Amino acid sequence: MFTGIVEETGEVKSIVHGSKSAVLTIKGSVVTKDSKVGDSIAVNGVCLTATSIMGDVFTADVMAETMRRSSLGELKQGSKVNLERAMLCNGRFGGHIVSGHIDGTGTVRNMEKEDNAVWVTIAATSDILKYIVEKGSIAIDGISLTVAYVDDEVFKVSIIPHTANETTLLTKNKGDKVNLENDIVGKYVEKLMNYNKQDTNIKSKSDIDIDMLSKYGFI
């Protein structure tokens, strides 16, 4: 699990493509400090497993499903990437719950400066936008951000100078893809709310209903 607080921007040293997969070699002096083979490192918001670590460079395999779902396939030698190690249990939870399992990609629609911040507009599909709420959280390329606006085509975030300096987001151009991960809470709520509707043959194991809640004074 991650928090969406990017620890550093690393650099892709090489990317070796298979027929549908890839092997990434990335330089990152912070995330490799106390990491070992088998540890999880988020690369632009995608949870990857370090398969080797040599000094400040690590490698990671990217499976075909990840290549289809993310923008990692568009990386090139020299590309800058946002990096974060898995969250420590005794650390501060500065962002929000980020699994590193992205929902898909969005497209940078526009960037507009306002005083000390920059508004970034991201276009996304309806299956992603339906989980995005104003003042809720979203991870863009692994960056935990607050949604300031959302409609049925786009959402917007406002980037402060610190975030701009510590991440790659403002280096993107119009039309570039970014990895998106919705707040996981909404997805679980939707699944549970529709569980019995999806399969009427499955009997609910829960005795909680409106009558029970009313009986015991919850409503």
Image: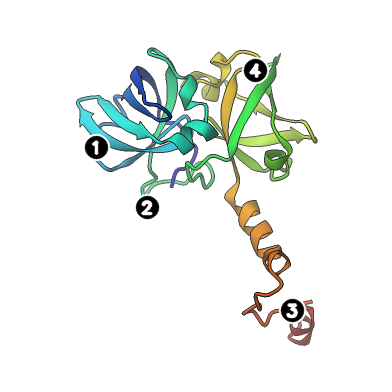
| Sequence-wise first label, 1 or 3 | 1
| Sequence-wise first label, 4 or 3 | 4
Q: Are marks 1 and 3 in contact (CB under 8 Å)?
A: no
| Sequence-wise first label, 4 or 2 | 2
**Residue kind at label 1, given as amino acid type:** Asp
| Sequence-wise first label, 2 or 1 | 1
Determine which quarter of the picture holds residue 214.
bottom right
Marks 2 and 1, how far apart at CA: 15 Å
Residue 54 circle label: none
Visible residue check, residue 5:
no
Query: Of the residues tagged 2 and 3, which is closer to the observer?
Result: 3
Question: Which quadrant of the figure contains the C terminus?
Answer: bottom right
Q: Residue furthest left?
A: 54
Residue 34 circle label: 1
Q: For mark 4, what is the residue? A: 116
The answer to whether 155 appears left or right of 91 in the picture is right
Q: How would you rate the neighbour count of disc 3 (Cα within 10 Å): few for under 14, some for 14-19, many for 20 or more?
A: few
Q: For mark 2, what is the residue? A: 89
Camera-side residue of 211 and 29: 211
**Residue kind at label 4, given as amino acid type:** Asn
Q: Residue 1 at x, y = what percent?
A: 43, 47
Q: Residue 62 at x, y = what percent?
A: 39, 33
Marks 4 and 3, how far apart at CA: 50 Å
Q: Are marks 4 and 3 in contact (CB under 8 Å)?
A: no
Q: Residue 185 at x, y = what percent?
A: 61, 54
Q: Residue at x 60, y 46 (%)?
A: 183
Determine which quarter of the picture holds residue 40.
top left
Q: Residue at x 76, y 35 (%)?
A: 150
Q: How would you rate the neighbour count of disc 2 (Cα within 10 Å): few for under 14, some for 14-19, many for 20 or more?
A: few
